[in-house]
């Protein structure tokens, strides 16, 4: 744990900028206060950039997330700071009286001001990276909104990717950026407190800095970082997609069965967890993601299935060919007149084919709306194609 330094953390951990136009790598570290590994990693990267006075095109800007929770070494004080970033929640935050709010309200207001400042001052595309660690062991992995641009960036790091979490969780900080068409990755570096986790985060940051052309590839030796990530990710499928989320509340008495690591393969009927209603079994053969082994949190676990390379390739082709245009002609499907990125689906008609086809085309957010299902996809700014 980094208690000695985290008590003195400032909101802006640092920035490295020579005023030369180029992409911005915007890093958020420690949005969960019991996850200081990201803070240590980005500080290492900033230190190296400064000590070696490395020339950059574009810039690296890093913020600390939940300062008070980091100082106290817990996930959050009053509420999860990685929630409340949806459009509606941010408006509510702006309207809330300062004295009445949670400790995290102040943190979020400062972060919002910082993010806005970075976006306004950007002289090129922005890539957002949110650094986490988890209470379970297992390889590092990335969560991202399912756009082809995000997938391409994720693949460049060599770290296994999970599709469909961003769209399942309401109001993660990634959502605030996805709403703006900004490329973004959440990085799960490994288990809390494990030294490898810091090194994994650092390796991802260097890979991205070089991939984005912010740092010249000749100035950093990426080989050890790449080797580390390849080794850490061994055995995990390169891309999986979420097929189920087990949401919990404190009243559920949820207890994950011991011994699950991220990407753990389970057979249909395997015992995953228990709660006050009894046993929770795997509905099919799949991989367990983010099993909860800590007191605070509202996701018990996620279940995922591998995305075969053929489907990943097909997704790219279909989206380039604007396959979504065809979706509107399917029976029971129509475009939301108010939003080009949302399709309204009559579930009685479209149920049997909807989900798989829609996911393929990036429509992963599923919401009930007036008896219909609304499937939305994330959009990506045109400049992201150059990333
Ligand atoms: Zn976290």
Image (tube, rainbow, N blue to C red):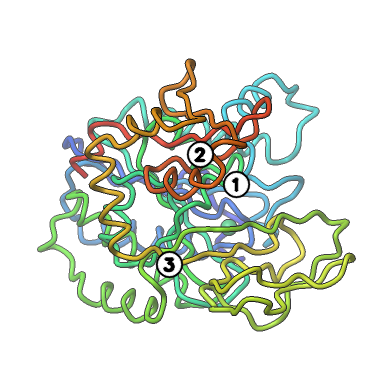
Label 2 CA crowd tier, 10 Å (few <14, some 14–19, many 20+): many
**Label 2 belongs to which residue?**
175
Q: Quadrant of residue 269?
A: bottom right
- Which residue is depicted at the point 45% across and 59% down? 162
**Quadrant in the picture for residue 245:** bottom right
Percent across and percent down for residue 312 are 31, 57
* Secondary structure type for disc 2: helix
Secondary structure state at the residue bearing disc 3: strand
Q: Determine whether the residue tagged by mark 1 lies in a helix, strand or loop.
A: loop
Q: Quadrant of residue 187?
A: bottom left
Mark 1 Cα shell of 10 Å, populated few (<14), some (14-19), many (≥20): some
Q: Are marks 3 and 1 in contact (CB under 8 Å)?
A: no
User: Which residue lies under the disc numbered 3?
Assistant: 306
Q: Which mark is residue 291?
A: none
Disc on res. 169: 1
Image quadrant where one finds the C terminus:
top left
Pointer 2 or 1: first along the chain: 1
Q: Quadrant of the N terminus?
A: bottom right
**Quick check: 379 above or below 26?**
above
Q: Are marks 2 and 1 in contact (CB under 8 Å)?
A: yes
Determine the quadrant in which ligand 1 lies: bottom right
Marks 3, 1: nearer the viewer:
3
* Between marks 2 and 3 in the image, the one whose residue lies nearer the viewer: 3
> Which of marks 3 and 2 precedes in the sequence?
2
Please name whichever residue, 319 or 213, is drawn nearer the observer in this view of the structure. 319
Q: CA distance from mark 2 to mark 3?
A: 23 Å
Residue 381 position, x and y percent, is 30, 32
Q: CA distance from mark 3 to mark 1?
A: 20 Å
């Amino acid at each position: 744990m980094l208690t000695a330094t985290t008590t003195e953390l400032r909101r802006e951990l640092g920035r490295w900028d020579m005023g030369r136009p180029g992409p911005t790598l915007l890093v958020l570290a420690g949005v969960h206060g019991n996850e200081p590994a990201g803070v240590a990693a980005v500080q290492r990267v900033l230190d190296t950039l400064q000590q070696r006075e490395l020339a950059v095109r574009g810039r690296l800007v890093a913020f600390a997330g939940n300062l008070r929770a980091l100082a106290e070494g817990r996930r959050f004080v009053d509420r999860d700071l990685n929630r409340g970033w949806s459009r509606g929640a941010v408006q509510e935050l702006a309207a809330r009286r300062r004295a009445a709010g949670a400790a995290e309200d102040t943190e979020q207001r400062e972060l919002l001001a910082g993010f806005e400042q970075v976006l306004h001052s950007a002289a090129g595309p922005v890539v957002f990276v949110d650094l986490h660690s988890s209470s379970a062991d297992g390889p590092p992995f990335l969560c991202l909104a399912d756009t082809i641009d995000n997938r391409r960036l994720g693949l460049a790091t060599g770290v296994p990717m999970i599709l469909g979490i961003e769209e399942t969780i309401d109001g993660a900080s990634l959502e605030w950026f996805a709403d703006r068409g900004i490329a973004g990755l959440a990085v799960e570096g490994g288990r809390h407190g494990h030294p490898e986790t810091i090194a994994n985060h650092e390796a991802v940051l260097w890979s991205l800095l070089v991939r984005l052309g912010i740092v010249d590839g000749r100035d950093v030796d990426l080989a050890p970082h790449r080797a580390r990530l390849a080794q850490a990710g061994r055995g995990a499928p390169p891309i999986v997609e979420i097929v189920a989320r087990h949401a919990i509340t404190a009243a559920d008495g949820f207890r994950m069965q011991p011994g699950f690591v991220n990407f753990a393969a389970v057979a249909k009927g395997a015992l995953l967890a228990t709660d006050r209603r009894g046993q929770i079994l795997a509905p099919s053969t799949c991989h367990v993601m983010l099993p909860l082994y800590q007191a605070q949190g509202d996701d018990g676990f996620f279940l995922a299935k591998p995305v075969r390379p053929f489907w990943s390739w097909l997704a790219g082709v279909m989206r380039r060919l604007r396959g979504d245009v065809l979706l509107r002609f399917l029976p029971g499907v129509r475009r939301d007149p108010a939003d080009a990125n949302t399709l309204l689906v009559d579930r009685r008609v479209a149920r049997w084919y909807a989900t798989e086809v829609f996911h393929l085309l990036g429509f992963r957010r599923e919401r009930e709306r007036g008896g219909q299902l609304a499937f939305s996809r994330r959009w990506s700014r045109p400049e992201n194609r150059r990333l």
